[in-house]
């Protein structure tokens, strides 16, 4: 009988589970659910945290929607998820398996996500210089731990292990005593050298960093262990891959040739192309550069313009409008309003309004916030504003990686992916206007399918 590979993606706003055939790589079943995991940052409005219990609950419910007969024939599990963030837990007691064939969280911290802004520019400049080609930014795991060392050292005393949310899922599935992490996720934490695949232990130790919180590094696409017990019908003893980055898995799912450039717009936005074989990144961070080099597979790299501002900008716009309407005594759902905004923008084919949507800043320029210019009495309709906002998201990412950079790198087409791009025709129209290259949209351009494909190709 056919065997299946289970791919899981633990994203910023949703989780997804995909079953692909181990023989054909075709998707046999999939299901996605929102996590609704965001929680208030308290008095510090720049804090961005999520409830891991809600995330794992959504993952369990997602698994419950997949065909039971196929789950029983899963031969391998791959996990990807949101990078940069950090979750703390206490060894194997970080979960509870007493509810049957699924686990729930126990003795964990909140997830501090990649969107977290508690590390100011002044604080980051006070940190030791990393031995890495990648800069350290707020929302990065090691920077967050340094922040706790300074502001809440007692917090760290309660936990023995740290990792990304996807690393946590792997650890709990396998019953690991510690955390294993691939270079893809380790690089996203900062203070990790991708050439040697080692943490900057000497630098961190000299700064008093709690080294026991650093995960053990294992190769990307390598195995972390086996499932400790039956999980939603998936047999005990099923191999589980070490968690990968959601961005790399999304690219893997839709980059069919090295001449493809991939544009992903989901919560955030990324534009990327593959660097040639043998490429080595620079020794030191280029702090003002908008292009970074992310570790990919088999010692290769992706050139990436990683914007903090993508679908989350549109979501913030919708939230603002619903909040205003609520204050005016009118209730409308976010989804209904979103659909009406897209309709308005489709009827407004162009706009001379200019929106710079960098409301979260950018890692290479954190103080560059959003602006609206060229405002006139004739361009204030919802159609104008929504059209200009969608164009602004594209203009921003292209300013970080211009089209001629892609062409010089040998890119022959743009592959579009991501949930925001999938559901927003206006955004797709603006993509096709913005690039001189043809634009195609990948059928399986998602991280859950990508991480399953990675394992499938390595069987």
Image (cartoon, rainbow, N blue to C red):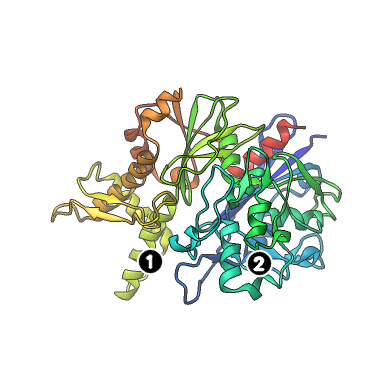
Q: Residue at x 57, y 62 (%)?
A: 144
In this picture, is 91 found above or below 221? below
Residue 258 rendering spot, x and y as whole percentages: 54, 25
Q: How many marks?
A: 2
Read off the residue under disc 1.
332
Q: Which mark is residue 53?
A: 2
Near-viewer residue (402 or 66)? 402
Helix, strand or loop at mark 1: loop
As measured in the structure, the alpha-carbon distance from the residue carrying label 1 to the one carrying label 2 is 29 Å
Q: Which label lies toward us, 1 or 2?
A: 2
Which residue lies at the image location 35% right of the left edge and 40% below the top edge? 399
Residue at figure coordinates x 67%, y 32% from the top left: 298
Q: Which mark is residue 57?
A: none
Q: Taking the image as drawn, is residue 66 in sight?
A: yes
- For marks 1 and 2, the one nearer the N-term is 2
Q: Position of residue 104 (x, y in %)?
A: 73, 65
Decide if residue 82 is in sight here.
no
């Amino acid at each position: 009988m056919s065997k299946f590979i289970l791919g899981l993606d633990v994203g910023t706003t949703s989780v997804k589970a995909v079953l692909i055939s181990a023989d054909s790589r075709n998707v046999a079943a999939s299901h996605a659910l929102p996590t609704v995991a965001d929680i208030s940052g308290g008095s510090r409005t720049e804090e961005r945290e999520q409830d891991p219990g809600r995330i794992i609950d959504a993952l369990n419910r997602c698994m419950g929607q997949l065909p039971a007969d196929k789950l029983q024939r899963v031969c391998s599990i791959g996990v990807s998820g949101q990078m940069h963030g950090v979750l703390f837990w206490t060894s194997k007691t970080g979960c509870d398996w007493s509810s049957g064939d699924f686990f729930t969280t126990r003795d964990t911290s909140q997830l501090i996500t990649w969107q977290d802004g508690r590390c100011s520019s002044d604080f980051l400049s006070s940190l030791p210089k990393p031995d890495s080609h990648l800069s350290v930014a707020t929302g990065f795991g090691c920077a967050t731990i340094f922040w706790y060392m300074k502001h809440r050292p007692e917090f760290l005393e309660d936990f023995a292990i740290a990792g990304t949310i996807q690393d946590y899922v792997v650890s709990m599935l396998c019953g690991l005593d510690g955390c294993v992490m691939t270079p893809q996720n380790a690089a996203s934490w900062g203070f990790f050298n991708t050439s040697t695949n080692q943490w900057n232990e000497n630098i961190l130790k000299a700064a008093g960093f709690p080294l026991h919180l650093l995960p053990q590094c294992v190769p990307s696409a390598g195995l972390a262990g086996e499932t400790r017990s039956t999980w939603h019908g998936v047999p005990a003893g099923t191999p589980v891959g070490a968690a990968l980055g959601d961005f790399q898995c999304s690219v893997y799912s839709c980059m069919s040739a090295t001449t493809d450039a991939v544009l992903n717009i989901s919560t955030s936005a990324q534009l990327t192309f593959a660097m040639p074989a043998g490429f080595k990144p620079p020794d030191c961070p280029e702090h003002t550069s908008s292009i970074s080099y992310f570790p990919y597979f088999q010692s290769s790299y992706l050139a990436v313009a990683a914007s903090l501002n993508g679908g989350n900008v549109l979501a913030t716009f919708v939230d603002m409008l619903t909040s205003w309407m609520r204050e005016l005594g009118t209730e409308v759902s976010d989804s209904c309003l979103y659909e009406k905004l897209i309709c308005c923008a489709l009827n407004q084919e162009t706009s001379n309004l200019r929106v710079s949507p960098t409301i979260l800043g950018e890692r290479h320029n954190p103080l560059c916030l959003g602006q609206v210019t060229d405002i006139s009495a004739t361009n204030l309709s919802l159609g104008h504003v929504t059209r200009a906002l969608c164009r602004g998201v594209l203009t921003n990412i292209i300013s970080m990686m211009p089209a001629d950079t892609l062409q010089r790198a040998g890119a022959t087409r743009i592959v579009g992916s991501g949930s925001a791009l999938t559901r927003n025709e206006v955004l797709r129209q603006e993509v096709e206007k913005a690039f001189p290259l043809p634009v195609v949209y990948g059928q399986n351009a998602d991280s859950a399918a990508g991480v399953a494909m990675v394992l499938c190709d390595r069987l």
